Amino acid sequence: MKKKPEYERPIITKINAGVTDKFGMRAKMPIISEIDGIPVNDLINKYGSPSFILSEQTIRKTFNDAKRAFTTRYPNVQFAWSYKTNYMNAVCKIFHSEGSWAEVVSGFEYDKALSNGVAPNKIIFNGPDKSKEDLIKATENGSYIHIDHFDELYELLNIADSSKKRPKVAIRVNMDTGIYPQWDRFGFNYENGEAWNALNRIMMSKKLDLIGLHTHIGTYMMTPTPYGVAASKLAELAVRTERKFNHKIKYIDMGGGFASKNTLKGAYLPGKDTCPSFDQYAEAISNALINSELDPNEMPTLFLETGRALIDDAGYITGSVLANKRLADGRRSMIIDTGVNMLFTSFWYEHEIYPAKEVSSHSEDTTIYGPLCMNIDVIRSVIKFPSLQKGDHYVIKRVGAYNMTQWMQFITLRPKIILIDTEGKAHIIRENETNDSLVALENVPDYLN
Amino acid sequence: MKLKKNIAVSETGFLFDSNTGESFSLNETGRKILQFLKEDKSEDEISEWFAENYEVDQATFENNLYDFFTVLQNFKIIE
Ligand SMILES: Cc1ncc(COP(=O)(O)O)c(C=O)c1O
């Protein structure tokens, strides 16, 4: 029998003479039919729909791009993987194998870094929530403790009295770098003298080893300039400390915050065209440090806790269309099996989503909803998208940062996470949840049984 | 479903509404449906024809057809 021609659903689009869409981009949407050589259909058939897919090749390439940008401009550079961004053990171990230390912000993350085999003296402990037990453990282990507030400083002075080890510390500094809003809730303020005050108290106490200065000026920073301002201010504090106490600061930690190539909601241009390159950030930071009054023969090590910019691009979601609907005003809407519960970042990003196979060249303004029974469950409020049928596959790009740590278990079970290694072989690095794995933590009091 | 009188559809899927001066483009499936509407074919006849001539089952096609009608109504192309 002769094969019938492929069917395409009926489409009509209004022609607006002379008006292009806001990006002036071609209407035909590219597709993503494979990830690192594995067809999307195979991934979905084997691992279920939806799943998170991570590309080891992309992680290593991105890391090495960033490393090259800094090491070609500054003599000693050390990256520390920001655990909160993605603490799947396999992901952490890739970064550690590239030479990254660990940057953690809780006892839970601290223990995770230890169990991933990170040497305790290569763990940076940040954040406002370190328990007394955490601080004792970090002190005994010789980890780097970044002090967030005076209460923590006094707690550490107490611990130092009873410990045989001297706590190795840095202070976290917040400051005006010309960006708004200024992040002033973490650490000690630079402009009002609080940071200098904290630094003096540490030095006068003679009980703590002040080895570093830290700042994290914000996240998704769309220009490199504030990093230059911040690096100058930290360099200035280091120079003042050396003059007054004849004490050398060993490292300056610039935190994280480099933008990834995702597009922020409401942005006029796509993030991949506007986000600064690693080279631009590296240029701003290195210039500020090199041009400061720091001793050129003994420059402090530059630490970086880059998170999203190192992992966002390596993550994908592969999934399926659940249904198409018309909204009351005639707009098309498409329901997919990824909701905001697993794509937390869709609250601030306009995530790129693509069909997994060649479809019609006609696109229509479409709202893409997740499967949750909630009004806030919107993946894209308006996107020109070709029409897919129920069961067709899609791929969401750049989802590697924060989603696998901030995802919520809500009305359904969290899916598998797959890592494609550098040889193109897929591995399950986190199983999907099951009813059993979830209720294992529950307990029903006897009288209800 | 009836096509309004002021609607003209070309062979290449270009649609012009002489009342409003608006123009639209159709894909092949859409163009064919409008041609059938012009010929006063019923919805059943249209779906049967597509199920016979294309790689599509009747249920999927009808689902798409009614969705398409909503859009046409919105654009005030059918009444
Ligand atoms: C102290 C600290 N370092 C590093 C990071 C990673 O930041 P990003 O993902 O923006 O690079 C964060 C994120 O909030 C942070 O709080």
Image (tube, coloured by chain):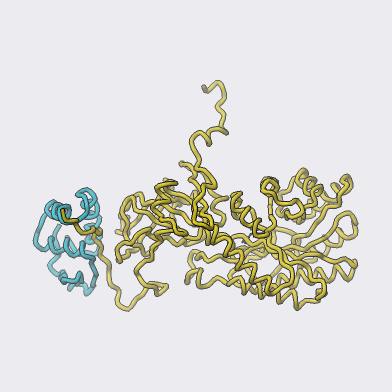
Chain colours: A yellow, B cyan
| Residue A193 seen anywhere in this rendered image of the structure | yes
Find residue A279 and report its image quarter: bottom right
Tally of numbered tags? 0
Foreground residue among A202 and A70: A70
A60 left or right of A393 in image: right
Q: Residue at x 47, y 72 (%)?
A: A269
Q: Residue at x 71, y 58 (%)?
A: A186
Q: Position of residue A148 (x, y in %)?
A: 75, 56
Does residue A284 lie above or below A348 as drawn? below
Q: Residue at x 50, y 72 (%)?
A: A273
A62 left or right of A194 in image: left
Q: Quadrant of ligand 1?
A: bottom right
Q: Position of residue A184 (x, y in %)?
A: 69, 61
A174 left or right of A364 in image: right
| Residue A174 seen anywhere in this rendered image of the structure | no
Q: Position of residue A316 (x, y in %)?
A: 48, 56
